[in-house]
Amino acid sequence: MLGLNDKAPDFSLPGSDGKEHTLKEFSGRYLVLYFYPKDDTPGCTIEAKAFSKELQRIRKLGAEVVGISKDDFDSHCRFRDKYVLSLLLLSDTDSKAIKAYGAYGDRGIFGFGTLRKTYIIDKKGKIAKIFPKVQPLGHEKEVLEFLSSVKD
């Protein structure tokens, strides 16, 4: 189980922009890495639209937002285009990164799968904040509040 100040697990995953992305490319700024169950479902849509809406404010605070789910490239592109999302979505079809971040588990009536969980990774690649059980509505405000409080 990952904890505060632990080194964030690296990943190399395809993005909705058609490029491969790794954790290292975000070094030197904060990374809001959020895990979500499925593209174009109610809670996931609320969360993605809210992060997309606040992306410029988040960037002004020195951070980037990236979403990860098991959905493939085509699904991410349809989701992005349907809701005009401006944030990067990564495909983890084998759940390797999802499991490395402890974002895989029992989802109750939905069975085992990706849990809604967010990590904020600092400029040096260490975990600065964990939101273990995210409620989609208003989560972007929690993230903005944390990023506004960071002094470094």
Image: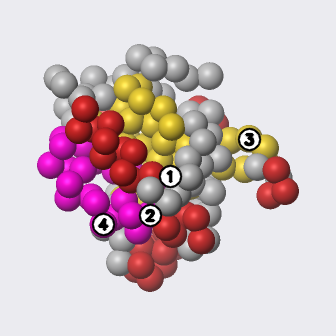
Q: Earlier in the sequence, mark 2 or mark 4?
A: 2
Residue on which disc 3 sits: 105
Q: Nearer the viewer, mark 3 or mark 1?
A: 3
Q: CA distance from mark 1 to mark 2?
A: 11 Å
Residue on which disc 1 sits: 68
Q: Earlier in the sequence, mark 3 or mark 1?
A: 1
Q: Is residue 6 above or below residue 116?
A: above
Q: CA distance from mark 4 to mark 1?
A: 18 Å
Q: Which mark is residue 48?
A: 2
How many residues crowd around disc 1 within 10 Å: few (fewer than 14), some, or many (20 or more)?
Answer: many
Tag 4 secondary structure: helix
Q: Is residue 84 above or below residue 146?
A: below
Amino acid at circle 3: Gly
Q: Is residue 66 magenta?
A: yes
Tag 2 secondary structure: helix
Q: Earlier in the sequence, mark 3 or mark 2?
A: 2
Judge by depth and name the residue closer to the eye, 63 or 54.
54
Residue on which disc 4 sits: 53
Residue 141 can be seen in this image: yes
Amino acid at circle 4: Lys
How many residues crowd around disc 3 within 10 Å: few (fewer than 14), some, or many (20 or more)?
Answer: few
How many residues crowd around disc 2 within 10 Å: few (fewer than 14), some, or many (20 or more)?
Answer: many
